[in-house]
């Protein structure tokens, strides 16, 4: 019996990676293009793959790049084991060899063995017998030697056998220890249970990207830890992500570690800030993100776990932990996770990523820093766009307190029913921004610290200024661009939302967008 | 045994925390004799002294097959199930 070895291989001629174990059980067939037996049974392998489609994966591993190209034409998809690492790990002497966990390997081609195996697995999978004319096949063919057993390759393969795509420290959790409790004890958790990042799960996660597992995506403060693809994948496993979500997590980690975004400040501030992720582009649909009913809430795996994975990466790779460098006075629940997709199709405007210079067909994640929110902006009675945008402005006055102007930025999430009001009056995003600035504009004298509240501009700011100067109007936001706008939410309900930002400019955090690797 | 991959930057060694100390001894105390010579004498003495001070505590005795090897998993499981505290005698 061959013991199963996990692996992560590229599909020959493609960037796509496939991992074993995967989501389904898998038959693994080692073949070589120049082996006559392998060539003779290609139709059988093809038929077996079609037969078990959706029930059991059939991974065909080819041994040379040139040969794999030929095999791909016959079989559609061949995994590239030209490095021979998997064949070596399985200790394969002969091609073809078919391995399936729990069964003895089928070495060479013995017709009766293959037939019995396929019949038995069909029965186990609840399938009828496949339409294969076994009698038309040779009773026995010996096969050829596997290149992994060739003495010319043996030394290299032996040296590289430890060269797994996984380099992270392996931690053995004792048989009597509970791995969930162990991970809490190690401080890996945000307070909720974690999925144990076993090597098999991490390999499977890595199949979601074509990037090298050891590529450093960014250096993450405060500990300046190397955020490699592998380390980010480990945290994505713990967060509960599917492999298809990993490119979003990678892009988000890259974005938060820029100087402009300033994740160190975001985590360290006593104001309790946290990243908010907005996802645009085709990946939203592909990974099933929620942009409609309850988009900012719970219940969708992609929304929930992508945001959580980013936060866990910051905690574990960067080392930002509450009580350490993370010093929030109150904290906020967005520190667990806050990620949603923009409902571009329900919006009359350019989506957020296009506004920021990306193509509509690109997938992009935008990182914004929030200290509060989403604050509900209730307006069920305004019938005109200026009224509605005016309501937004009045609500946004509350950011940090009504007298604090020029202090922060905001992310406004406009709900569909409010969109309809704006559409009726032909209102653009620029119109909304201008209206918010208009209705929030206050004379400087109203924004000075006084006996009602010590917030606002310091009293000495007014010294030496004329009465006319003190009448100058100051809007809530330093610039219209500090009002970020996205569209999401259910079709029913006149309730838009707004996130309150943190410090802006060079000392604070700027919203940063990052393209997500295209799907392969 | 489960193997997991370290999610951190690996600056800090993996630690295994000891069970939180309650500050009081209640329930059952296990004595684990590692089977070195005269370990049983030490444990006898300790049990006598502790029994005088802790009349409500139950004491149980266990022994490893040999001091040269770790306690077998079954024994560790048995002790863990039966006792709230363990005193291991390393007599020499």
Image (spheres, helix red, strand yellow):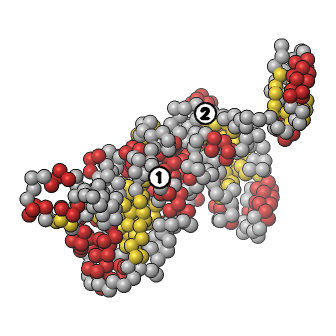
Front residue of A281/A27: it is A281
Q: Residue at x 77, y 68 (%)?
A: A126
Q: B34 or A460, which lies in front?
A: A460
Please state which of the two labelled residues, at mark 2 or mark 1, is closer to the viewer: 1
In the rendered image, the vertical position of residue A301 relative to residue A260, given as above or below: below
Residues flagged by tags 2 and 1 on a common chain: no
Residue depicted at 33% across the width and 61% down the height: A401
Q: Compared with residue B63, is residue A332 higher up or lower down, i.e. above or below? A: below
Pinpoint the chain carrying mark 1.
A
The residue identified by callout 2 is: B14
Seen at 39% across and 57% down, the residue is A370
Q: Which mark is residue A306?
A: none
Q: Label 1: state its secondary structure.
A: loop
Is residue A238 left or right of B52 when viewed as pictured?
left
Classify 10 Å Cα crowding around label 1: few (below 14), some (14-19), many (20 and above): some
Write the residue at 33% across / 83% down: A382
Q: Is residue A165 visible?
A: no
Mark 2 crowd level (few <14, some 14–19, many ≥20, 10 Å Cα): few
CA distance for labels 2 and 1: 27 Å
- Number of marks in the image? 2
Q: Chain of mark 2?
A: B
Q: Which residue is mark 1?
A: A331
Find residue A512 and report its horizontal and vertical position in percent: 33, 54
On the image, the x and y values in percent for residue A47 come to 66, 63
In the visual, does A47 lie left or right of B67?
left
Give left or right: position of B24 versus B17: right
Looking at the image, residue A289 lies above or below residue A18: below
């Amino acid at each position: 019996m061959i013991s199963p070895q996990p692996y992560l291989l590229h599909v020959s001629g493609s960037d796509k990676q496939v991992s074993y174990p995967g989501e389904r059980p898998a038959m693994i067939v080692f073949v070589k293009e120049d082996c006559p037996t392998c060539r003779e049974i290609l139709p059988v392998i093809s038929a077996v793959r079609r037969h078990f489609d959706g029930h059991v994966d059939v991974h065909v591993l080819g041994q040379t790049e040139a040969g794999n190209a030929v095999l791909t034409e016959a079989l559609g998809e061949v995994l590239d084991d030209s490095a021979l690492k998997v064949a070596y790990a399985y200790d394969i002497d002969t091609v073809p060899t078919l391995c399936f966990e729990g069964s003895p390997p089928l070495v060479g081609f013995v017709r009766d063995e293959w037939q019995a195996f396929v019949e038995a697995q069909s029965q186990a999978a609840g399938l009828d017998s496949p339409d294969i004319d076994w009698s038309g096949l040779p009773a026995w063919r010996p096969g050829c030697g596997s290149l992994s057993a060739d003495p010319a390759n043996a030394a290299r393969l032996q040296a590289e056998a430890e060269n797994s795509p996984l380099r992270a420290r392996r931690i053995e959790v004792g048989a009597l220890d509970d791995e969930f409790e162990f991970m809490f004890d190690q401080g890996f958790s945000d307070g909720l249970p974690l999925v144990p990042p076993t090597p098999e799960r991490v390999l499977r996660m890595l199949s979601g990207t074509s990037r090298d597992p050891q590529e450093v995506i960014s250096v993450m403060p405060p500990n300046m830890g190397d955020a490699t693809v592998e380390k980010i994948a480990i945290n994505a496993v713990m967060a509960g992500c599917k492999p298809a979500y990993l490119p979003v997590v990678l892009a988000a980690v890259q974005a938060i570690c820029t100087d402009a975004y300033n994740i160190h400040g975001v985590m360290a501030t006593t104001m309790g800030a946290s990243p908010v992720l907005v996802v645009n582009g085709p990946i939203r649909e592909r990974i099933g993100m929620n942009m409609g009913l309850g988009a900012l809430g719970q219940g969708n795996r992609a929304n929930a776990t992508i945001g959580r994975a980013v936060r866990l990466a910051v905690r574990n790779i960067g080392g930002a932990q509450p009580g350490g460098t993370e010093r929030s006075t109150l904290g906020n629940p967005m520190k667990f996770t806050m990620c949603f997709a923009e409902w571009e199709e329900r919006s009359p405007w350019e989506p957020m990523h296009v506004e920021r210079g990306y193509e509509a067909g690109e997938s992009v994640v935008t990182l914004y820093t929030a200290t509060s929110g989403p604050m509900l902006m209730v307006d069920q009675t305004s019938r005109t766009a200026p009224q509605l945008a005016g309501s937004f402005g009045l609500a946004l006055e509350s950011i940090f307190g009504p007298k604090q102007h020029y202090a922060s930025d905001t992310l406004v999430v406009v709900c569909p029913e409010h969109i309809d009001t704006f559409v009726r009056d032909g209102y653009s995003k620029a119109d909304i921004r201008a209206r918010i600035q208009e209705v929030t504009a206050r004379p400087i004298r109203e924004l000075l610290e006084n006996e009602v509240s010590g917030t606002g501009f310091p009293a000495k700011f007014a010294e030496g200024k004329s009465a006319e100067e003190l009448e100058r109007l100051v809007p809530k936001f330093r610039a219209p661009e500090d009002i970020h706008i996205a569209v999401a939410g259910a079709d029913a309900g006149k309730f838009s939302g707004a996130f309150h930002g943190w410090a802006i400019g060079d000392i604070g955090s700027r919203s940063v967008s990052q393209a997500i690797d295209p799907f392969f | 045994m489960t193997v997991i991959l370290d999610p951190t930057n690996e600056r800090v060694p993996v630690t295994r925390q000891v069970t939180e100390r309650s500050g009081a001894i209640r329930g059952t105390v296990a004595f684990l004799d590692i089977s070195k010579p005269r370990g049983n004498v030490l444990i006898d003495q300790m049990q006598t002294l502790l029994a005088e001070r802790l009349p409500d505590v139950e004491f149980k005795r266990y022994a490893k097959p040999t001091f040269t090897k770790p306690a077998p998993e079954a024994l560790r499981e048995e002790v863990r199930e039966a006792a709230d505290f363990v005193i291991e005698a390393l007599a020499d």
